[in-house]
Amino acid sequence: MQKKEKSFGIQMLSVQPDTKPKGCAGCNRKIKDRYLLKALDKYWHEDCLKCACCDCRLGEVGSTLYTKANLILCRRDYLSISSGFMLPFQIRSLYSPGNVKVF
């Protein structure tokens, strides 16, 4: 039996000048850039929506992100974890505790 992937869409939105700035889910700062991303029903700076494993900018690598063990991942790293090649705790050990973001 094949497991269904937990994938979510990423939308790039243009900020309208007359709207109130939204807060970024990654850094908690106001988004004052011309563009922002919407994913997981939250708003993000383009630089803040990254894969927890390889740190790639998810808005640049496609229009989909994946979640596993409370981590936001690109497709490649999601498949590595799902196939058993890399376990979520191994990803966490690659980074110091202060650098890992769990949502």
Image (spheres, grey):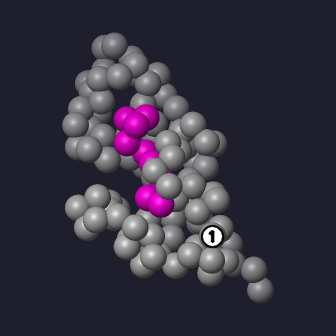
Task: Write down the quadrant of residue 7 in the picture.
Answer: bottom right
Task: Identify residue type, mark 1.
Answer: Ser
Residue under numbered circle 1: 80
Q: Please, which residue is most extreme toward the top here?
A: 17
Residue drawn at the location 56% of the way across and 75% of the way down: 86
Work out whether 19 lies above or below 48.
above
User: Residue 65 location, x and y as percent?
Assistant: 56, 53
In screen coordinates, is 7 left or right of 67?
A: right
Q: Please, which residue is most extreme toward the right here?
A: 1
Crowding near the residue tagged with mark 1, few <14, some 14–19, many ≥20 C-alpha atoms within 10 Å: few
Residue drawn at the location 58% of the way across and 63% of the way down: 77
In screen coordinates, is 5 left or right of 16?
A: right
User: Residue 36 location, x and y as percent?
Assistant: 42, 31
Tell which of 49 and 43 is nearer to you: 49
Answer whether residue 47 is magenta in the image: yes
Q: Main secondary structure of the magenta part?
A: loop
**Which quarter of the image is occupied by the N terminus?**
bottom right
User: What stretch of residues is rendered in magenta?
Assistant: 45-53
In screen coordinates, is 27 left or right of 68?
A: left
Residue drawn at the location 26% of the way across and 44% of the way down: 27
- Judged from the image, the secondary structure of the residue bearing numbered disc 1 is helix
Residue drawn at the location 75% of the way across and 80% of the way down: 2
User: Residue 69 location, x and y as percent?
Assistant: 45, 74
User: Residue 76 location, x and y as percent?
Assistant: 64, 59
In screen coordinates, is 16 left or right of 54?
A: left
